[in-house]
Image (spheres, rainbow, N blue to C red):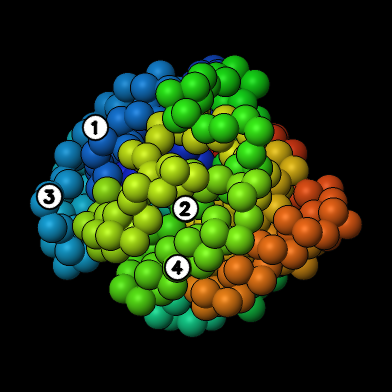
């Protein structure tokens, strides 16, 4: 029986983290699969860090990242260049991930080429097309053109059914990010001594980079950080500051120079995973962090008003706090002062998987294409 040619496409660091263990699982099943990898390099530097960590050498590298790129040029570049890749590779199936512009445009390009597409992390929804922007429409669109839907949770499966996706093409697999995280913390523990954190202080990890938090929201987050360090001499913040100028400018204006606020460059995945594991509390607007941190027993306060990951809220591993300064201060203070509340969040069961999502996806592909 001929091998199934699977083309995996991704372009950003979050996609790479979640798709890398799937690429490795396909490589390990080479008796059944021919694995081909295409990266768009929607994010260049941060993408390369993950490729190096997992020892992945792409077969196609579109290298599309440009200074001040926008959604119009990004979408058109991916759409057109993926046409050339599909004509060259002629895959049996294309795998895309999540909600990036790379995923949406690569899925559309494959649809035009009449190539089946599998959507990893399918079915996430906020049901607000402008929040997060443009991710909500990206994932809805990808689900609409894909054939196979690899959903991480029961809720995401239900969202797909409500969207009239055929049940026979919806598969609950868990989230591949847990596969990546568990592999990384077990095999690539990083040395964080260069961050010069005080081991006698509680560490709060902060990440914020989403478009909807640009402007006043991120300034409010920074003001909350200042108030918290002023009122709590036992804590320190560490903030890997995203390279986007819309993040860098307000963050450095408001937070630079404080001895217990460590503003650092974005971390590669292995040190970031280690930092999550060694932190006490996490504040983040990242979708991936909402899934990863609970596996490490870390409470997450989400700097957003809605989330496409309601399972974590339901299970008590994360809490939505938005970007209001007073609310952020109140919720962090509650975790610092209330051991029972901290224990309840840190010991809640992570609903996003057991580290076997990639194996499930590969098994499903083998079964579907061998019918």
The residue that label 4 is drawn on is 223
- Alpha carbon separation for disc pair 1 and 4: 44 Å
* Mark sitting earlier along the chain (2/1): 1
Q: Nearer the viewer, residue 284 or 228?
A: 228
Residue depicted at x 27% and y 27%: 59
- Give the vertical position of 1 relative to 324 (above or below): above
The residue that label 2 is drawn on is 207
Q: Can residue 12 be seen in this view?
A: yes
The residue that label 3 is drawn on is 66
Disc 1 residue crowd, few under 14, some 14–19, many 20+, Cα 10 Å = some
Disc 2 residue crowd, few under 14, some 14–19, many 20+, Cα 10 Å = some
Disc 3 residue crowd, few under 14, some 14–19, many 20+, Cα 10 Å = few
* Mark sitting earlier along the chain (2/4): 2
- Alpha carbon separation for disc pair 3 and 1: 18 Å
Image quadrant in which you'd find residue 359: top right
Q: Which of 77 and 347 is in front in this view?
A: 347
* Mark sitting earlier along the chain (2/3): 3
């Amino acid at each position: 029986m001929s091998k199934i040619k699977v083309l995996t496409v991704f372009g950003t660091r979050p996609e790479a983290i979640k798709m890398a263990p799937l690429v490795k699982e396909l490589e390990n099943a080479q008796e059944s699969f021919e694995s081909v990898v295409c990266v768009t390099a929607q994010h260049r530097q941060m993408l390369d860090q993950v490729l190096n960590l997992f020892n992945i050498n792409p077969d196609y590298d579109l290298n599309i990242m440009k200074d001040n790129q926008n959604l119009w040029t990004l979408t058109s570049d991916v759409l057109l260049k993926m046409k050339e890749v599909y004509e060259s590779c002629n895959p049996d199936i294309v795998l895309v991930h999540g909600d990036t512009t790379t995923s949406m445009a690569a899925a559309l390009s494959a649809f035009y080429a009449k190539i089946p597409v599998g959507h990893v992390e399918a079915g996430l929804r906020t049901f607000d097309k402008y929040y997060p922007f443009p991710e909500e429409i990206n994932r809805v669109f990808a689900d609409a053109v894909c054939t196979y839907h690899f959903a991480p949770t029961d809720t995401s499966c239900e969202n797909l059914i409500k969207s009239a996706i055929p049940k026979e093409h919806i598969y609950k697999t868990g989230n591949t990010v847990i596969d990546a995280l568990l592999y990384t913390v077990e095999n690539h523990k990083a040395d964080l001594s260069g961050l010069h954190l005080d081991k006698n202080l509680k560490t709060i990890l902060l990440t914020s980079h989403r478009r909807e938090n640009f402007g006043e929201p991120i300034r409010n987050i920074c003001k909350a950080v200042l108030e918290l360090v002023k009122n709590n001499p036992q804590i320190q913040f560490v903030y890997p500051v995203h390279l986007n100028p819309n993040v860098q400018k307000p963050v450095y204006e408001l937070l630079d120079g404080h001895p217990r606020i460590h503003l650092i460059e974005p971390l590669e995945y292995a040190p970031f995973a280690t930092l999550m594991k060694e932190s006490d509390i996490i504040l983040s607007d990242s979708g991936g962090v909402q899934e990863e941190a609970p596996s490490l027993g870390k409470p997450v306060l989400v700097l957003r008003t809605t989330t496409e990951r309601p399972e974590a809220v339901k299970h008590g591993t994360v809490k939505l706090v938005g970007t209001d300064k007073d609310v952020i201060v109140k919720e962090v203070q509650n975790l610092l002062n209330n051991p029972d509340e901290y224990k309840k969040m840190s010991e809640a069961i992570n609903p996003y998987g057991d580290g076997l999502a990639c194996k499930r996806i590969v098994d499903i592909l083998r079964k579907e294409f061998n019918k």
